[in-house]
C-alpha cells in the first residue's frame, strides 16, 4: 500500500516572469518554466516514482508542466484528468495587473492580505477559503480515493489551489497558511496513513 500523493506547482509562466496577477488567465510557460517542469520530472524519475493517475487544472501552464514531467518519467501515455476545480485562485479585478503597481496603488499590506490571507478575497475574485471550497471537495471525491486505493498520484496545479490543499493536509490554521509558499516546479511528496492523515511529507528541493 503506497498511498502516495505528489503535488507540483507549474513551472514559471510568462506572467510570473512579468510579475502580473494571473489567476484564471492562461499564459504559457517560459523557457525557465519548461526547464523547471522537466527538472521536477527528472527528480521524480530519480526516486523511481511510477504514477497510477495524474490530475491537472484547465489551464495550460499546469497541463504543460504535467506533460513535461510525464515525458521525463517515460509515462506520457498515463491518462490525465483535467478539472477547473484545480485552477488557480481567481484573482478577479487584479488579473493582468502588475504586482508592484498594485502595491503602489493599494499599499503593501492590502496587497499582501489579498495574496496570502485565508478569507479576504481580492476585488471580484476568490479568497483562499473560496478556492479551497472547490479544490477540497474535488480532492476528496476524485483524487483521494485513488491514493487510498494504494495508488501513486501526481497533481500539477497552481500556487493557491495547492496552498489550499496543503493547508488541509498539514492541518494549518488560517494564521499559519499566510506564511506558506509553494515554489514552482518543486515536488511535494505526501505518504498517507490508512486513515488519510499524513504519515510523511517531503519537499524535493534542489
Ligand atoms: O495567479 C498568480 O498571479 C500566481 O500564479 C500566484 O500568485 P500569488 O503569488 O500572488 O499568489
Image (tube, rainbow, N blue to C red):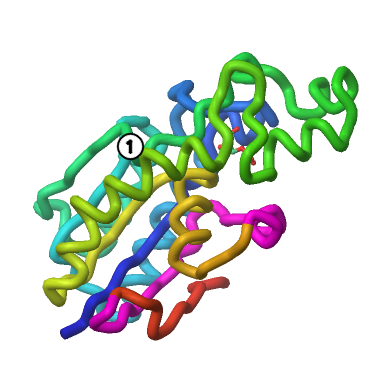
Q: Secondary structure at mark 1?
A: helix
The correct choice, above or below, for 177 with respect to 2 in the image is above
Front-most of residues 29 and 188:
188
Q: Is residue 173 left or right of residue 51?
A: right
Q: Is residue 142 above or below residue 169?
A: above
Q: Position of residue 169 (x, y in %)?
A: 44, 66
What is the magenta range?
174-195
Vertical order, 189 against 53 (above or below): below
How many other residues sit within 10 Å of disc 1, few (<14), some (14-19) or many (≥20)?
A: many
Q: Quadrant of residue 111?
A: top right
Nearer to me, 15 or 178: 178
Residue 5, position as x, y percentages in the image: 31, 68
Q: Mark 1 highlights which residue?
A: 85
Left/right placement of residue 112 relative to residue 17 reads right
Nearest the viewer among 16 and 138 is 138
Q: Quadrant of residue 70?
A: bottom left
Viewport quadrant of the C terminus: bottom right
Q: Residue at x 70, y 57 (%)?
A: 175
Give the image quadrant in which the ligand numbered 1 is located.
top right
Image location (x, y in percent) of residue 47: 33, 80
Residue 5, compared with residue 194, is above or below; it is above
For the question of whether residue 115 can be seen, the reply is: yes
Which residue: 45% across, 44% down?
A: 132
Amino acid at each position: 500500500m503506497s498511498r502516495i500523493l505528489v503535488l507540483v506547482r507549474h513551472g514559471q509562466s510568462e506572467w510570473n516572469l512579468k510579475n502580473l496577477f494571473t489567476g484564471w488567465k492562461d499564459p504559457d510557460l517560459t523557457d525557465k518554466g519548461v526547464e523547471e517542469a522537466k527538472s521536477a520530472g527528472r527528480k521524480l524519475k530519480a526516486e523511481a516514482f511510477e504514477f497510477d493517475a495524474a490530475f491537472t487544472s484547465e489551464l495550460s501552464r499546469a497541463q504543460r508542466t504535467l506533460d513535461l514531467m510525464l515525458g521525463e518519467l517515460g509515462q506520457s501515455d498515463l491518462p490525465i484528468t483535467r478539472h477547473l476545480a484545480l485552477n488557480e485562485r481567481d484573482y478577479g479585478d487584479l488579473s493582468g495587473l502588475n504586482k508592484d503597481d498594485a502595491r503602489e496603488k493599494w499599499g503593501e499590506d492590502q496587497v499582501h492580505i489579498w495574496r496570502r490571507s485565508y478569507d479576504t478575497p481580492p476585488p471580484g475574485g476568490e479568497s483562499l477559503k473560496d478556492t479551497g471550497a472547490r479544490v477540497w471537495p474535488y480532492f476528496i471525491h476524485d483524487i483521494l480515493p485513488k491514493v487510498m486505493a494504494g495508488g501513486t498520484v501526481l497533481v500539477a496545479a497552481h500556487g493557491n489551489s495547492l496552498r489550499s490543499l496543503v493547508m488541509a493536509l498539514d492541518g494549518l490554521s488560517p494564521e499559519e497558511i499566510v506564511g506558506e509558499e509553494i515554489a514552482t516546479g518543486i515536488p511535494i511528496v505526501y505518504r498517507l496513513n490508512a486513515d488519510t492523515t499524513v504519515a510523511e511529507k517531503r519537499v524535493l528541493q534542489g
